[in-house]
C-alpha cells in the first residue's frame, strides 16, 4: 500500500462534531496507520474553536495525540489546521491567528456556505489569493452551490484554488448525487486532493482514505489517484507548490 496523507480530519476530541474523546482520537489514528497514513492535519471547524474553545486548546490537543503516537513509536504525525467557513472576517482572522492555515502553510482549507449563495464569496476567494493564500475548497462534490453552478468551481480552480474531494463520496456514502459529482469533477480535472473528513472511529464518517484511493484509481488511474492522496497533500504539508 502506498503512503497516504490526510488534510481534512475532525479527530480532535470534544472540539466540534468530530471525535468525542481522546480514546476515539487515538482509535482514528490507529485506523489511519493501518491504511498507511503518515500524516493527518486536524481541521476542527474555525467557528467551534473560536466561539467555544481556543487556538491554544486545539494546539494542546494535537500535542497530546502526538505524545501518544510517539510513546507507541508510531510512524505517523498529526499537524494542525482548520476548516474555515467563508465569511468577511476570514482574512483578518488569519492575520490575527484566529483562522489557521493547513500546517501553517500558504494553503487554507475553506468551506463554502451550505445554504444560500452570498455575493461575497468570489470576493473573499479573490482577496485570499491576492494576499498570497491558496484556498483548498472542501468537498465541492457535496455543496449545493457547485451543484447549481459547476462553472463556479471551474472558475475558482482557474483563479488558483485547489479542491478537496471526500474519499467516501466516491463510493456513495453521501448519496448518488455526490457520487456522480465526484466522478465528474475527477474526470474534469477539478480535484487536487482526496481527504477523509473523518468525524468518528466507526460508522458513517469513519477514516477511509484507502477505499477512496481504490475508487479514484478505477476512475482516473493510479498515477493521478496517487497524486491526490500522496504528492499533492504532501505538498500542502511541506508548503510546496503542487
Ligand atoms: Fe470537515
Image (cartoon, rainbow, N blue to C red):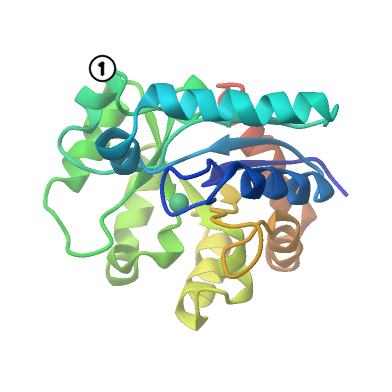
Identify the residue shown where x is 68% and y is 27%. 66
Up-down: is 21 above or below 215?
A: above
| Residue 242 in sight from this viewpoint | no
Task: Locate residue 90: give its quadrant.
Answer: top left
Q: Nearer the viewer, residue 232 or 47?
A: 47
Q: Where does the image place residue 45, in percent across and percent down from the top left?
A: 38, 43
Dot 1 falls on a residue whose secondary structure is loop
Q: Residues within 10 Å of mark 1 (few under 14, many from 20)?
A: few
Identify the residue shown where x is 58% and y is 57%. 200
Which residue is labeled 1 in the image?
96
Which residue of the protein is positioned furthest toward the left in this rendering?
Answer: 119
Identify the residue shown where x is 55% and y is 21%. 239
Up-down: is 108 above or below 111?
A: above
Identify the residue shown where x is 19% and y is 41%. 87
Q: Where does the image place residue 212, in percent across and percent down from the top left?
A: 68, 61
| Residue 49 in sight from this viewpoint | yes
Does 127 sit left or right of 192 as displayed? left
Up-down: is 166 above or below 178?
A: above
Up-down: is 86 above or below 66?
A: below
Q: Nearer the viewer, residue 96 or 54?
A: 54
Does 28 sit left or right of 131 as displayed? right
Task: Locate residue 98: give its quadrant.
Answer: top left
Q: Where does the image place residue 237, in percent across and percent down from the top left?
A: 60, 27
Amino acid at each position: 500500500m502506498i503512503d497516504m496523507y490526510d488534510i481534512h480530519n475532525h479527530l480532535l476530541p470534544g472540539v466540534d462534531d468530530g471525535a468525542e474523546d481522546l480514546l476515539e482520537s487515538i482509535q482514528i489514528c490507529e485506523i489511519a496507520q493501518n491504511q498507511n497514513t503518515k500524516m493527518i492535519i486536524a481541521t476542527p471547524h474555525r467557528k467551534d474553536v473560536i466561539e467555544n474553545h481556543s487556538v491554544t486548546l486545539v494546539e494542546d490537543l494535537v500535542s497530546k495525540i502526538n505524545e501518544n503516537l510517539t510513546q507507541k513509536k508510531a510512524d505517523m504525525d498529526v499537524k494542525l489546521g482548520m476548516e474555515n467557513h467563508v465569511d468577511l472576517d476570514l482574512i483578518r482572522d488569519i492575520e490575527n491567528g484566529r483562522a489557521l492555515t493547513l500546517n501553517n502553510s500558504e494553503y487554507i482549507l475553506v468551506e463554502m456556505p451550505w445554504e444560500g449563495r452570498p455575493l461575497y464569496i468570489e470576493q473573499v476567494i479573490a482577496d485570499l489569493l491576492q494576499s498570497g493564500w491558496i484556498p483548498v475548497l472542501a468537498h465541492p462534490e457535496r455543496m449545493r452551490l457547485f451543484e447549481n453552478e459547476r462553472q463556479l468551481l471551474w472558475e475558482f480552480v482557474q483563479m488558483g484554488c485547489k479542491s478537496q474531494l471526500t474519499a467516501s463520496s466516491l463510493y456513495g456514502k453521501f448519496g448518488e448525487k455526490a457520487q456522480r459529482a465526484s466522478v465528474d469533477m475527477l474526470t474534469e480535472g477539478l480535484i487536487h486532493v482526496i481527504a477523509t473528513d473523518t468525524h468518528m472511529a466507526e460508522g458513517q464518517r469513519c477514516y477511509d482514505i484507502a477505499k477512496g484511493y481504490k475508487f479514484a484509481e478505477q476512475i482516473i488511474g493510479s498515477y493521478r489517484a496517487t497524486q491526490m492522496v500522496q504528492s499533492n497533500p504532501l505538498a500542502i504539508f511541506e508548503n510546496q507548490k503542487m
